[in-house]
Image (cartoon, rainbow, N blue to C red):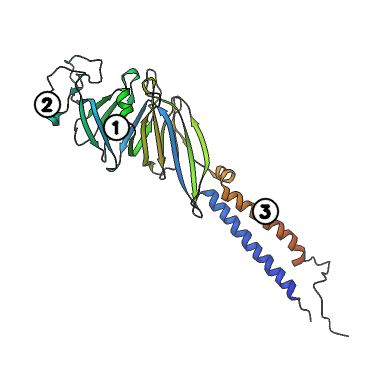
Amino acid sequence: MKRRWPLQEFRRKAFLALLAVYALLLLLICLQASGMLSRETISVGAVSRSVTIKHVGETSTWDFEDIVLCVRKPFDRSAARRSGPCDERRFIHGFPETGEETADAPYDPKERHSVTLGMHDGVVTTLTWEADRGIWLDLDGHRSFETGARIALSKEQWQRIGTLTFTGRATIGAAAASGEDGILLSGNYEVRERSIFSRRTDSIKTGAFRRGDSVSLVGPDGSARVYGAVFPDDGGASSTAFHVTLASSEASAVKVSYFGAADPALIRANLLDRATESPYILALAFALSVLFGTAELLWPRCFPTSGRRDASLVDDAEAP
């Protein structure tokens, strides 16, 4: 009758345990590479001459002092065209809620107003850099201005106001076209991920935008909610654009539209990006290689070939 020594049984069980750990690590690598075990955040930073924002919720308030304010009206072909921000064919100069009656008053570029805008669902704001004239903010859907409004800021006022924050959906840069000045000048994006096993975030994909691109963040079902900020350039009076930053944990891709393309490009992190940049996948792959080497060493000891007899396998043959 044959029996195996306990050491040989232990080796076999240890080998099977290594195979189980090997399979588990391989599964973790696949799940991590697919993004199922991590939370993704996409951020964008750009220098642009325009940005369009559709606000979500009531999370931001914008305060303006000593600004030119114009309320939109139905287009009037009989009115004279003005070169300033308040074209009398499209706007009434003034703020109706102050009680001022300015519908028939001549346009006075020196008239100034102060206003606080509490953003809410459905408000659409478009900030445009108008060369030497400063920044124009077009407002649609706000409860205080049913027909829309325009706010004009000089570069100096823009510097004093500082950062404007928002929550919503945003598009940076107008589509490139002949005569279009509100384009994106430069920018970059970064995709960061945080594993469920750690609080640390790691950059797994970065890239840059070209001049004239139109950029937004999108999710699986369309545009994604972002947290963003618009702030003046440090160049002061010599500035030619403003800065925009966006960040979203709901977005799954960066949508880039550019001149000459029939369809926009969608930039997202893929399996190769995670496999080459994620430290967790690299660590798991290293552990996997160590286990594989250990398994190779244990294999001949645990499962010797039939043509060889290991010294650890001793037969207690019955005496003749």
- Mark 2 neighbour density, 10 Å: few (under 14) some (14–19) many (20 or more): few
The image quadrant that residue 294 belongs to is: bottom right
Location of mark 2 (residue) = 100
Q: Is residue 53 left or right of residue 24?
A: left
Q: Position of residue 146 (x, y in %)?
A: 19, 33
Can you tell which mark lies on residue 289? 3
Amino acid type at image mark 2: Glu
Select label 1 or label 2 by which is in front.
2
Q: CA distance from mark 3 to mark 1?
A: 54 Å
Amino acid type at image mark 1: Thr
Q: Are marks 1 and 2 in contact (CB under 8 Å)?
A: no
Q: Is residue 105 left or right of residue 235?
A: left
Q: Position of residue 56 (x, y in %)?
A: 30, 41
Residue 267, can we see it? no
Q: CA distance from mark 1 to mark 2?
A: 25 Å
Instruction: Residue at 29%, 40% (x, y): give it.
Output: 60
Location of mark 1 (residue) = 125
The quarter of the picture where the C terminus appears is: bottom right
- Check the image and report above or below for 179 versus 5: above
Dot 1 lies on which element? strand
Foreground of the two, 59 or 256 = 59
Q: Is residue 226 left or right of residue 188?
A: left
Residue located farthest toward the right when viewing the structure as drawn: 320
Q: Which numbered disc, 2 or 3, marks the residue that appears first in the sequence?
A: 2
Dot 3 lies on which element? helix
Residue 133, can we see it? yes
